[in-house]
Image: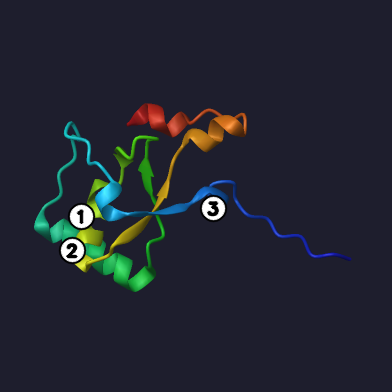
Amino acid sequence: MTATTITPAMARHIEHWPTDRLRPNARNARTHSPEQVAQIAASIVEFGFVNPILVDSNAGIIAGHGRLLAALKLGLVEVPVVVPGFWRRLGRPPIWVKSY
């Protein structure tokens, strides 16, 4: 019997980009207080960067502005990102992008 590993499609498409490559969306409706950014940073320290930043193909942030602020607070020079265009190649629509 051979071992089979199942890796979620998104996990195979996580990339690591320099923080200075990412462009926050000026129209982002969510704001993060310094306390919230500190909480996110503490979570990244304790658990790791478990939720990648969602970016478009032009490096614009779709979701994850607070995670970027926390990464910068921690002095991280790169962060995990996902570009949702890969779902189209898999034949699945990026439904969650419509909600942002």
Q: Are marks 2 and 1 in contact (CB under 8 Å)?
A: yes
In the rendered image, residue 39, in percent from the top left (x then y), is placed at: 21, 63
Residue situated furthest right in the rendering: 1
What's the mark number on residue 11?
A: 3
In the rendered image, residue 96, in percent from the top left (x then y), is placed at: 43, 33
The residue shown at (71%, 60%) is 5
In the rendered image, residue 57, in percent from the top left (x then y), is placed at: 40, 35
Q: Is the residue marked by circle 3 packed among few (<14), some (14-19), or many (20+) residues within 10 Å?
A: few
* Sooner in the amino-acid sequence: mark 1 or mark 3: 3
In the image, taking residue 70 as reference, residue 96 lies left or right, namely: right
Give the SS element for disc 3. Answer: helix
**Amino acid carrying mark 2 in the image:** Lys
In the rendered image, residue 73, in percent from the top left (x then y), is placed at: 18, 63
User: From the image, which quarter does the C terminus lie in?
Assistant: top left
Q: CA distance from mark 1 to mark 3?
A: 23 Å
Determine whether 66 is above or below 28 in the image: below
The residue shown at (48%, 51%) is 14
Q: CA distance from mark 2 to mark 1?
A: 6 Å
Q: Is the residue marked by circle 2 packed among few (<14), some (14-19), or many (20+) residues within 10 Å?
A: some
Between 98 and 57, which is closer to the camera in this rendering? 57
The residue wearing badge 1 is: 69
What's the mark number on residue 73?
A: 2
The quadrant holding residue 56 is top left
